[in-house]
Amino acid sequence: MNKHDLRVIKTKKNIHNVLLDLLKKKSLSQISITELCNLAEISRGTFYFHYQEIGDILDEIFEKTMQDLELWYSDPFKNGFNINQKNLAPGMIKIFNHVKRNEAFYRIILSSDIFIKYYYLLYENIMKLHRDFGSGQFEQNKYTLSYSANGIIGLILEWHKEDFNSTEEEMNNRLYEILKFNDL
């Protein structure tokens, strides 16, 4: 299988979209492969060619979304930005732009039915981003990294609880004010 084959890309995108639509209505455990295949208009053979079970699809969507998160998160650091600098501005913070762009995904993984597994995966990804792009401000201290990662997730959770009613800019400003207050 060539992952760059346009047919594979279109098939997987279709399967991803169908699963995300189904997850808006029911839990992962309530979705059958038959139902997913019927709605995606694919055969079971096609499904099993790409996946072993439905959870594999959500894992793949998660991985793709985390790659996108890394692009948004790392954007300010591309030009040598250091979070310790006093020139931090809300417009430099991009993480909430990513969340808003992937709002349907975050609505699903932050639901109580799916939450805990993906909470820990999201936590690990944000910790990794802090280590990789944090310019040493966390001094690789696992407790400081944990505090920071959970703070970001906490902001995303509150935004989710308010049904993503705030804009990305408002969320960026909230994080900016927290960072400024803590003098990071």
Image (cartoon, helix red, strand yellow):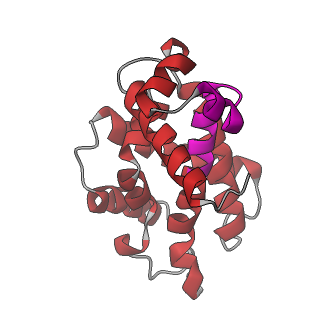
127 and 181: which is toward the camera? 127
Which residue is at 56% across, 60% downward? 6
Q: Measured from the top left, where is residue 49 in percent x and y?
A: 70, 36
- The answer to whether residue 149 is visible is yes
Using the rendered view, name the quadrant where residue 38 is placed: top left
Q: Measured from the top left, where is residue 171 in percent x and y?
A: 33, 55
**In the displayed structure image, the side of residue 134 where residue 142 appears, left or right:** right
Q: Measured from the top left, where is residue 184 in percent x and y?
A: 54, 67
18 and 94: which is toward the camera? 18
* The furthest residue to the top: 30
- The answer to whether residue 178 is visible is no
**In the displayed structure image, the side of residue 108 where residue 142 appears, left or right:** right
- Kindly report the secondary structure that dominates the magenta region of the rendered protein: helix
Q: Is residue 59 above or below residue 180?
A: above
Q: Measured from the top left, where is residue 36 in percent x and y?
A: 49, 25
* The furthest residue to the bottom: 79
Which residue is at 53% across, 45% downward? 11
What's the magenta region?
A: 44-64
Residue 126 belongs to the span the image colors magenta: no
Which residue is at 71% across, 62% downward? 131
* The furthest residue to the left: 165
Q: Is residue 171 above or below residue 155?
A: below
Using the rendered view, name the quadrant where residue 107 is placed: top left
Count up the numbered dots. Answer: 0
13 and 97: which is toward the camera? 13
47 and 157: which is toward the camera? 47
